[in-house]
Image: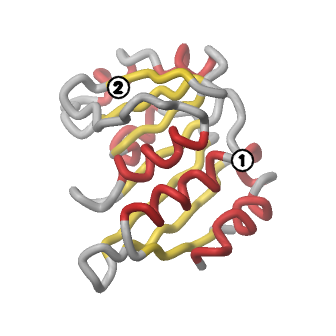
Amino acid sequence: MSATARTSDVEQTRLLAAAVAGLVRAGDLLLLVGDLGAGKTAFTQGFARALGIAEQVTSPTFTLARSYTGRLVLHHLDVYRLDRLQEAEDLGLAELLDDGGVVVIEWGDAIIPVLQPEYLEVRIVLGAGDDDRELAFRPVGSAWAARASALTAAVAPWS
């Protein structure tokens, strides 16, 4: 079961992400998938805001990972520049997931073979207008599948 949503500007994307953040638990993993400029970082900014993170969230493209403290610790990773799956394993994802925080990975579909089989995939696609986005949420594994109805309800205002 998956849920879909549409936004027509960056702030709506952030608000949608905030609604999703209301469902997360310690140890959760979200994979953000989409073309360059699709809104992965904007999604993470709204997600972080909902976790009570006041710091400015920027894409960790060159640093690979940043952590922010709020209601939960948010580990924000960008694996776009990784050349090999071994490099992803070297990031210590298992440890990040075990520290009681939430991990959000931009371009996460590139490293699925080294990830746990429990995550929420958020696929962001450019829409017809310049600021239009279509988002598809796909729960993978039992933890997110158990929250599928709550996820559908959370994103319903944007459906």
Q: Is 32 above or below relative to 71?
A: below
Identify which amino acid the numbered label 2 is placed on: Ala
Q: Is 109 above or below relative to 9?
A: above
- Image coordinates for residue 65, horizontal then vertical, percent: 34, 24
Q: Which residue: 43% across, 44% down? A: 45
Closer to the observer: label 1 or label 2?
1
Tag 1: Cα neighbours inside 10 Å, few (<14), some, or many (≥20)?
few
The quarter of the rendered structure image containing the C terminus is bottom right
Q: Is 10 above or below relative to 25?
A: below
- Image coordinates for residue 75, horizontal then vertical, percent: 47, 26
The answer to whether 61 appears left or right of 54 in the picture is left
Q: Quadrant of residue 114?
A: top left
Q: Which residue is mark 1?
A: 23
CA distance for labels 1 and 2:
26 Å
Q: Which residue is mark 2?
A: 88
Circle 2: element type: helix
Q: Which residue: 44% across, 41% down? A: 112
Q: Residue furthest front?
A: 54
